[in-house]
Image (cartoon, rainbow, N blue to C red):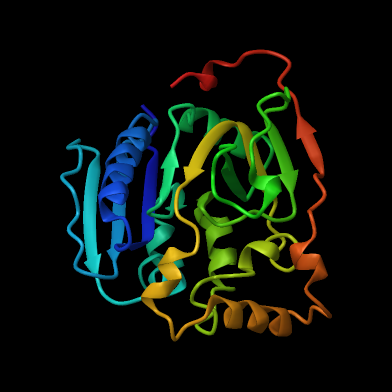
């Protein structure tokens, strides 16, 4: 048996709509455990006193509950250091309001990730998800399975430890909400990004979490990123990104199965 390990981090869990988020967390743990893992380290970073729900028990699963103030960038910087993550084969970063659908097959994700030598791989958003980035939305009427793009909204990133270490170098304390970092994945970090058309996630809540820390505006962090990376204006960051490749499967593969 191949030993395959996964480091999962939820970089922020709490208000608002904690009941919904509890159900999402329970479901996502069950979904991840359908993968070919022999070890899963699940880290939930709770920024308030919202209780965690009872999670599925599995001998492969270890859950770490972290309670401290912070925003997504703070939690990644503190608790997903390259020194920690390199002990695992892959890392999954997923927000507390993102639900993985049952068509997310991790064995197939691994196959595509390695075959196309990707650095970041993400499910696509369902058509009813709350998102301003249309390139993230699934196109169920299209036959393609995977597209590569220069950018990808941070909702659910699947990466290996090497790619994550490069991403980690660009997490900046001046931008704790991480706005704009998803726009420079290829342009400034050199990461190869893929979005899966046939594997989906749903984003439930847009913008409400920022009210937890009103003194830390995500817009200020976004403007900081533009200045830091010497972008003349925000057009390259907001325009519809060009799809570089579309991959259509020519045959079924056993790794498509759960």
Q: Position of residue 114 (x, y in %)?
A: 61, 38
User: Does 29 sit left or right of 107 as displayed?
Assistant: left
Q: What residue is shown at x 48% (from left), y 31% (from top)?
A: 104
Q: Position of residue 53 (x, y in %)?
A: 18, 48
Q: Is residue 22 visible?
A: yes
Location of the C terminus (image quadrant): top left
Tell how many labels: 0
Q: Nearer the viewer, residue 164 or 242?
A: 242
Q: Position of residue 220 (x, y in %)?
A: 59, 83
Q: Quadrant of residue 214?
A: bottom left
- Most extreme residue toward the top, as rendered? 251
Answer above or below: position of 150 versus 24: below
Q: What residue is shown at x 60% (from left), y 78% (from top)?
A: 219
Answer above or below: position of 160 versus 27: below
Q: Is residue 114 visible?
A: no
Q: Nearer the viewer, residue 106 or 36?
A: 106
Q: Position of residue 69 (x, y in %)?
A: 30, 77
Q: What residue is shown at x 64% (from left), y 69% (from top)?
A: 180
Q: Quadrant of residue 212?
A: bottom left
Q: What residue is shown at x 70% (from left), y 23% (from top)?
A: 141
Location of the N terminus (image quadrant): top left
């Amino acid at each position: 048996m191949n030993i395959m390990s996964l480091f999962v981090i939820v970089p922020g869990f709490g208000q608002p709509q904690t009941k919904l988020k509890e159900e999402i967390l329970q479901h996502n743990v069950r979904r991840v455990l359908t993968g070919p893992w022999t070890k899963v380290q699940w880290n939930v970073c709770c920024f308030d006193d919202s209780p965690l729900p009872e999670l599925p028990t599995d001998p492969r699963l270890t859950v770490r509950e972290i309670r401290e103030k912070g925003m997504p960038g703070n939690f990644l910087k503190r608790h997903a250091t390259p020194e920690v993550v390199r002990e695992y084969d892959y890392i999954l970063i997923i927000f507390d309001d993102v639900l993985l659908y049952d068509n997310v097959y991790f064995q197939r994700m691994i196959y595509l990730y390695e075959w196309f030598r990707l650095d970041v791989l993400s499910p696509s958003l369902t058509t009813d998800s709350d998102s301003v980035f249309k390139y993230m939305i699934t196109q169920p009427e299209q036959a393609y399975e995977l597209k590569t793009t220069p950018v990808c909204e941070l909702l659910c990133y699947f990466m290996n430890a090497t790619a994550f270490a490069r991403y980690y170098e660009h997490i900046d304390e001046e931008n704790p909400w991480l706005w704009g970092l998803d726009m420079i994945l290829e342009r400034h970090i050199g990461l190869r990004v893929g979005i899966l058309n046939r594997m989906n996630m749903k984003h439930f809540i847009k913008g409400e979490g920022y009210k937890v820390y009103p003194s830390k505006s995500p817009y200020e962090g976004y403007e900081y990123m533009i200045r830091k990376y010497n972008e003349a204006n925000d057009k390259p960051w907001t325009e519809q990104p060009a799809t570089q490749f579309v991959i259509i499967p020519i045959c079924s593969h056993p790794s498509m199965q759960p």
